Image: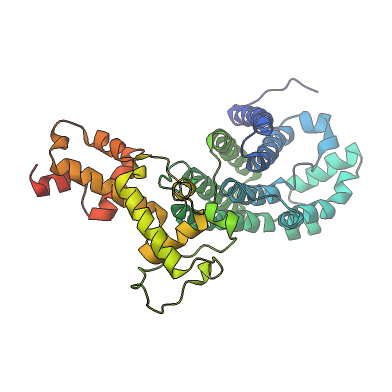
Amino acid sequence: MAGLTLDWFQLGAVVGALHGVLLTGVLLAQRNNRTANRILAALMAAFALYLASSVYYSTPLFRAFPYFFGVSYPMPWIFGPLVYLYARAASDRAWRFTPKALVHFVPAVVSIVVGFQFYMMGPAEKIAAYDRWTRGGMPPQIALIDPLKYVSGIAYSAATVLYLRRHRRHIQDNYSNTARVNLVWLGWLAGSAMAIWAFATTLRLTGANAPVRDEQLSLAIALLIYAIGYLGLRQPEVFRYVTTEFPVVHASPAPPAPEAGASEEVPSRYERSGLGDDEAMRLKSRLLELMDKQQPWKDSELTLADLAARLDSTPHKLSEVLNVQVGSTFYDFVNAYRVREVQRRIAEGDAARLKMLALALDAGFSSKSTFNHVFKKHTSQTPSDFRQAIGV
């Protein structure tokens, strides 16, 4: 084999593949969020193999060692399902990979079956098959299924984005600070993956030459490896307290409940909770008293489970009281107290000697961006506008 020389695109693919291998090992060694990290490790390994194959085929390595011809071909059918399943596992610590999830990998298995004859070829036959392939002589069976990988990639990316949108609504029933558990970064990843698949589809439809397509895709995938691997390592576990007790489909927050004694029907989400009207009213009364006297909302990491424990109740019952009796998600309920606390301190003149961020942190907010967003949501004003409006 002649001396191996790599251009910048190929070098980037090699570095990306090595990082993929490294991240695979690190993720497998993680003790927390194990299901999610194992799926992410599988994704990193698949990415690494795909990147390595781009160098394998574009250098003399293939002709020197043709034995691995076609090994990376099923990978594009694996990327989308793994990202989607990682979103499921990362958004709910209780989620487990079951045999039912294997259905997502049926297309990858089909691609292996269709290409099985190529795996069984001898070295010289594999080189000849590859040469025919690159000259436009794609076998009919491969030509039939190949476009479906683009459909799969776009479909799974879209499914991941939609799932994460539902997840962000759901965690507002469980967390008062959603910044670390809303998986926004994964939404951006899925959106980026969709853009890459759209880019690849466009190149295929317009007939752009293969070397350009492979190099651009390899670079984009290398960037995704850096992003998803390192951000995934920092992702804390997400607990879905309501669904661990009563596995129900998330519903939108219920409207404010009628006065006691009214005959409104309880939302189907809570039909089997066993929480009677009298107990619900007592729990609501204790909740409001606790919030006023002990001010648990000053804890920036307060969760539904934490508050339920203080009330000697369960997360599901407390969630029912908030959604049905109070008419609010846990997130909005707790942050309303924090906003009122900041408003009170601004009105008392504390904003003249302390920065607005200090007031926000004291009230339980975890960041300036979250504070500004929540404050405007509850008051229709920015903190500065509110301060000017009351003239302090």
Reply above or below: 251 against 90. below
Residue 147 visible to the viewer: no
Report the number of numbered marks.
Answer: 0
Residue drawn at (51%, 54%) of the image: 314
Residue 157: x %, y % from top left: 57, 53
Q: Nearer the viewer, residue 37 or 73?
A: 37
Q: Nearer the viewer, residue 127 or 43?
A: 43
Tell me if I can see residue 375 in this picture.
yes
Residue toward you, 72 or 186? 186
> Residue lying furthest top in this view?
3
Residue 280: % across, % down: 43, 64
The quarter of the image holding the C terminus is top left
Rendered position, 232 above or below 319: above
Quadrant of the rendered image containing residue 158:
bottom right
Image color mode: rainbow
Image quarter where the N terminus lies is top right
Quick one: which residue is furthest to the left in this view? 391
Residue at 70% over, 37% down:
45
Which residue: 51% across, 50% down?
191
Query: Residue 382: x, y in percent?
Result: 21, 48
Classify residue 282 by image quadrant: bottom left
Q: Is residue 146 left or right of residue 8?
A: right
Residue 203 screen position, x and y as percent: 58, 51
